[in-house]
Amino acid sequence: MAYTLEAFCSDARTILKADSSPAGVERVRKKMELLIRDPEFVREHFHDGVKYGPRRLFVDPELGFEVLGYRAEKARTSPAHDHGDSWALYGQVRDYTEMTEYNRLDDGKDPDNARLGIKSKYKLETGQVGMYWGSQLHSTFTPTDCCYLRLTGTDLEKRPRVRIDQNTGKIMK
């Protein structure tokens, strides 16, 4: 029996309504693993005819969480960033995403520059889901044509967030 996007969103709503703490989000992460491993879900939402770039697949009208599908047209490295006062789950559907997590090495007093140190570097492989909470700095590298599903606690584009060029330390406003 297929695990559909609709069933996942309903499960996520039920879980997050009862517990939006890291423990609740972890339960949603486990459900997301089931979803991205379901061949019917992958065929429907990540087939070769799907357009490149991000696609908003669902927004919960009550809780505000969002489900977005991504298909990378070309290889891309994101700047180091956080999720402000929210969180995100990245679920790898096809290929891999290289994740780099950072520690901030400076005191945070310079509003224009930061010093970062690599905390860890790893790949999210097909079928794996990573959880990134609030101010946890990380960057992503996605190869050409990789696909992933991202669930965020809210529309992150409407939240204050930190973005840092990990090569220069420049804080992007």
Image (cartoon, grey):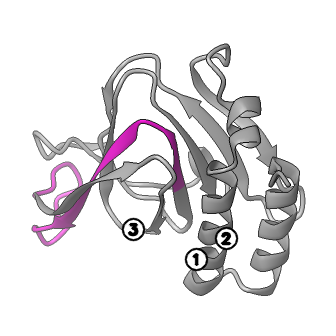
- Report the disc number at residue 26: 1
Q: How many marks?
A: 3
Q: Position of residue 147 (x, y in %)?
A: 52, 33
Residue 167 appearing in the image:
yes
Q: Position of residue 128 (x, y in %)?
A: 48, 57
- Report the disc number at residue 28: 2
Q: Secondary structure under badge 2? A: helix
Distance, label 3 to label 2, CA atoms, is: 20 Å
Distance, label 1 to label 2, CA atoms, is: 5 Å
Closest to the observer, 145 or 131: 145
Residue 155 appearing in the image:
no
- Report the disc number at residue 72: none
- Mark 3: give few (<14), some (14-19) or many (20+) Cα within 10 Å: some
Span of residues in magenta: 90-115
Q: Position of residue 141 (x, y in %)?
A: 31, 37
Q: Which residue is mark 3?
A: 135
Q: Is residue 43 left or right of residue 18?
A: left
Q: Quadrant of the C terminus?
A: top left
Q: Secondary structure under badge 3? A: loop
